[in-house]
Every structure is written in structure tokens, then in C-alpha cells.
Image: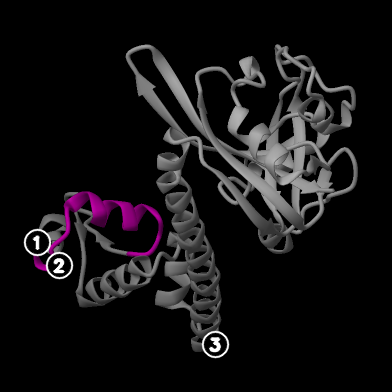
Amino acid sequence: MLTVSRLAKVLGVTPDVIRHYTREGLLRPLVSSENGYRYFDETDAIALLNARVARSLDFSLKASQVFTAGSLKAQEALLAEREAELDREIEHLVEQKKRLREIRSFLSKTELCRRNVVEDVRRPAIHSLYTVSGMRGDEPADRTAFERIAEWTEHLPYTHISLSLPARELNDPDFHGLYGVRLGIGVTDAWLRVLRLDTTPPVETVPAGRFLIYYGITDDFFALTPDSVRPLLEKAAALGVRFLNDTTGRLLAIEETKEGPRYHYLIRVRIGD
């Protein structure tokens, strides 16, 4: 027979582990009527080791008890259930890694922001839900957006911080003030199919098509003016196209400087004749 300390030593665990498993009922030592000491035998040692096998597979302590003392059928069910859980976890990790690579690729595009690059590309649809609007962050007119935003933020990082400038103001050559910027959450068409988010209004969908993408830097999203996106306006003018929708955008990175945070971003806007 082994004492708590002796059993702990031969199994390579601490006495607290032995006491914990005893309190949970997995070990059933004999208690001396003379001194109150607990004594364990080889049955307890095997049970404890088998329970630790289960715990090493991330079974709960309750499940570990079933794995140690339950029927073979119950043990098989536990193992099958845990395997299914691992399959789901692996699938989630694969998706998370894919998204991480996407975010890394967007971070690499901050170099384009320094050069105010404008790209002429074709892109699939994109969907956005805005909850901050106006030049100074006034609340949106459609308050149902607040009822939906939590679902979209729960799916970060597969959704992203979105930025919108009004097409009406972008198309107006006489506009010289602050753009009516809106901020919210966006999702690409590819991730929308995975996440199955509701895209009914107030969600705004910009259809697939031809886009101009502008890469810029600002220290205040609500201080954007035509001068802030001058390369975008000049590119549209040179192509002889107009902006068909409000822009969608994406925060690429926040860089801390001595003057404060600087926001690297892109905005993409669908264009046509």
C-alpha cells in the first residue's frame, strides 16, 4: 500500500494531484482507522494513469472518469466525440490560418499607402454594415444597424473594419469640404458564403465589377477631403469614368508615431461610364 506522497513519487505527479483526483472520486483509497491516513494500491495507480491519458486528450475530469471506469461502449463514444471535436477545431484553425495570411498580405500593402497608389481592377461583391456616420461620428439614420453589428463583430477577423465615402461627394468636382465618412464592419463575398451573414438592409452590398482601389494614410478618418484622395479622383478623371457606389474600404494597419496613430487604409469604389 502507498501513501499519498509515495504514490505521487512513483507516478511523477505532485501530492496535490493525488488529493484532487481523490476528492473527485476517481481514486478510492483505504482510510486507516488508526491514524486517518489514506493508502493506495496498484489499482489506484493504474486508474490515475489512465485518467491522465484521457486528460492529455483534453477530456474533462468527468469524462476521464467514464474513460477510466465506464463501459467499453461508453469509452468508444467518448473517443469518437472527441475526434469529431478535433476535426472541427482543425477546420477552424485552417480557416484562421487562411485569414491570417490574408491579413498579412494586406499589411504588406501599406507600402502602397506610402506611395498613394491607385489600382484599376475587377473585384467580386462586398458587403458592409455601418454604425458610425457623419463628419464627426453621428449615429446612423437606420438604428437597426445596431441590432446587427454584434453578429458581424463576433466574426472578426473574417469580417473587417470598413470605411465608406459618399459617391455623390466624390463625383462632385465642386465639393471641397470634409467627406461624410462612415465606419463599420465589412465582409468579402467569399467570407460571406462561409459565415452566412444576413445581408438584408441596412447592410449595403456593392456588386461585382470594375473598381479603383486607392491606398492612403491618415491620422483622422473623419478629416478626409478631396485632397486626401486626390490620386483617386485624378485616375477616375483620366479614365473618363464616374463612381457608381459609395466606397467600401479596409483598415490595413495602425502605426504609432511620435505625433500619434497613423491609419493605413484602402478604399475601393466601383466605376463605370
Tell me the element at label 2: helix
Disc 3: CA contacts within 10 A as few (<14), some (14-19) or many (>=20): few
Q: Alpha carbon of mark 3 to alpha carbon of mark 1: how far? A: 33 Å
Quadrant of the snapshot with the N terminus: bottom left
> Label 3 belongs to which residue?
73
In the drawing, what numbered circle is on residue 220? none
Q: Do the residues under discs 3 and 1 have CB atoms within 8 angstroms?
A: no
SS under mark 1: helix
CA gap, disc 1 to disc 2? 5 Å
Residue at image coords 67%, 21%: 226
Residue nearest the viewer, comparing 230 with 189: 230
Question: Could you say where residue 42 lies in the image, as x and y percent from the top left?
Answer: 20, 76
Asked if residue 21 is positioned above or below residue 266 in the image, the reply reads below
As for residue 19 lying within the magenta part, the answer is yes
Q: Quadrant of residue 44?
A: bottom left
Residue 11: mark:
2
Relative height, residue 204 to residue 139 (above, below): below
Q: Residue 261 in the image: x percent, y percent?
A: 43, 20
**Is residue 29 highlighted in magenta?**
no
Instruction: Tell me the magenta residue range.
Output: 9-27
Residue shown at 84% from the left, 28% from the top = 168
Instruction: Label 3, secondary structure: give it.
Output: helix
Q: Main secondary structure of the magenta part?
A: helix
Say which residue appears at 27% left-offset and 52% top-offset.
19
Number of marks in picture: 3
Disc 1 target residue: 9
Identity, as a three-letter code, of the amino acid under mark 3: Lys
Q: Nearer the viewer, residue 120 or 110?
A: 120
**Residue 8: image location, x then y, percent:** 15, 60
Q: Is residue 144 left or right of residue 49?
A: right
Q: Amino acid at mark 1?
A: Lys
